[in-house]
Image (cartoon, helix red, strand yellow):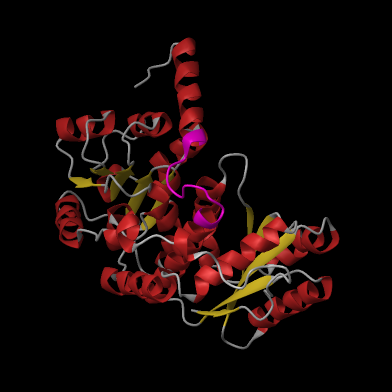
Amino acid sequence: MKLNADFLPRTPWAREKPPEEVHPGPEEVPFIRRKPDVEAVMRVAEEALSQVEPKNLIVAGHGGSITTFKGIHSSLVVYRDSPQVFFVDTVDRRWLNLVRKRAEKRESLLLIVSKSGRTQTLLEAVQSLRGYPTVVVTQPTKSPLREMAEREGWPLLDHPPDVDGRFSGGFEPALLPAFLSGIDLQKYLEGIGEGYGEWFGPEKELYELSWRFYLWEKAGREILYVPIYSKGLSGFSHLITQLIHESTGKEGRGMTVLVAEGPECQHHTNQRVLGGRGNIYAVFTIPGEDGPLRWEAEGAMESFREAGIPYLIQEYEEIDEKTVGRYVAFWHIFTLYSALLRGLPPFGQPEVERAKEHSRRIRQRKGAKSS
């Protein structure tokens, strides 16, 4: 995956380089410092597959627990002869009824992913899916989900406690469902490692490009538009949104991101970004291969140049495990830098946790069972 910053100029009044003093060392970044336990992933997968040879994989979780795998699924799994995947990220009864109807228990595996093991809506959804062969990923601390797994004898895989869910794309929460779906973990992790090696460091290009984006924000470019010209990679829209919003939306500051699939976004959102308020900057994800899909992207980018909208280009070649791994790594590092350069802590999501607490209290008032 190549970057092209020809159309992301430096703001004329800006200092030439970003401040090196805010750049962290690798030991300060959990998702770079820590390595995944791939052997544990394989062991737990083997335990899970001893229960059933699944034609269906039900992946239950919220947010960072499953957003990376959603992108892996969209980019790779759907193009292969893999189990059908049903995502359960809701307590919508209509959807849960459909999952139960389509995924028969004798040929399905339920994978529950939750770092905290306390997310109320997930626990409620799991109650409606009892009876399926089940495997759990959660952190190694006491929680309702972990207690349930131990009581039922379900295979258990530890979620790294110091890695936020949205940054766990190179760890057990993403690796277990990926492996169960036939993904080559070695190649995927190689892609992530290559991306970290290429983009993490105060001297690396992405640090300076993240600085440019921050300066354009200070100049009034408040919304980061991310048109993704790939049916598969567009499945990472939830991950990108979560990374940017949870990591930078703090202390009354931060970025707003709008992710859309190209070329379809040209038929609705381009009117807003080109004809509306002039507060947009962009990251285009486009194919390297010449052809109709690239031509559509080139036409959109020409319109951006005419409108004076700054943008960065990500260019991909074949979409395979390594490409997907590098794509995940790019957004991890870009998000990390985007938070730090704004003087914001990249990890944690206090407002999200506060909203969960409100939901728990509402359930208690309504008399619903609460953890």
Q: Which residue is drawn at 17% across and 44% down?
A: 155
Q: Residue at x 51, y 46 (%)?
A: 246
Left or right: residue 270 versus residue 182 is right
Is-magenta flag for residue 343? yes
Q: Residue at x 57, y 71 (%)?
A: 17
Q: Is the magenta stretch mostly helix, strand or loop?
A: loop
Left or right: residue 40 versus residue 162 is left
Q: Horizontal and vertical percent for residue 239?
A: 49, 55
Q: Residue at x 44, y 11 (%)?
A: 367
Q: In which quarter of the image is residue 283?
A: bottom right
**Farthest-out residue, bottom:** 290
Q: Quadrant of residue 208?
A: bottom right
Confirm whether residue 74 shows in the render.
no
Q: Which quarter of the rendered picture does the C terminus lie within?
A: top left
Q: Horizontal and vertical percent for residue 285?
A: 59, 72
In the rendered image, the vertical position of residue 291 relative to residue 257, given as above or below: below
Q: Nearer the viewer, residue 71 or 214?
A: 214
Q: Nearer the viewer, residue 307 or 209?
A: 209
Q: Which of 99 and 71 is in front in this view?
A: 71
Confirm whether residue 316 shows in the render.
yes
**Farthest-out residue, right:** 275
Q: Quadrant of residue 212?
A: bottom right
Left or right: residue 135 versus residue 228 is left
Q: Horizontal and vertical percent for residue 51?
A: 17, 48
The number of numbered badges drawn on the structure is 0
In the rendered image, the vertical position of residue 192 relative to residue 107, given as above or below: below
In the rendered image, the vertical position of residue 127 relative to residue 289, given as above or below: above
Is-magenta flag for residue 354? no
Q: Horizontal and vertical percent for residue 233?
A: 51, 67
User: What are the residue bounds of the magenta stretch?
Assistant: 340-351
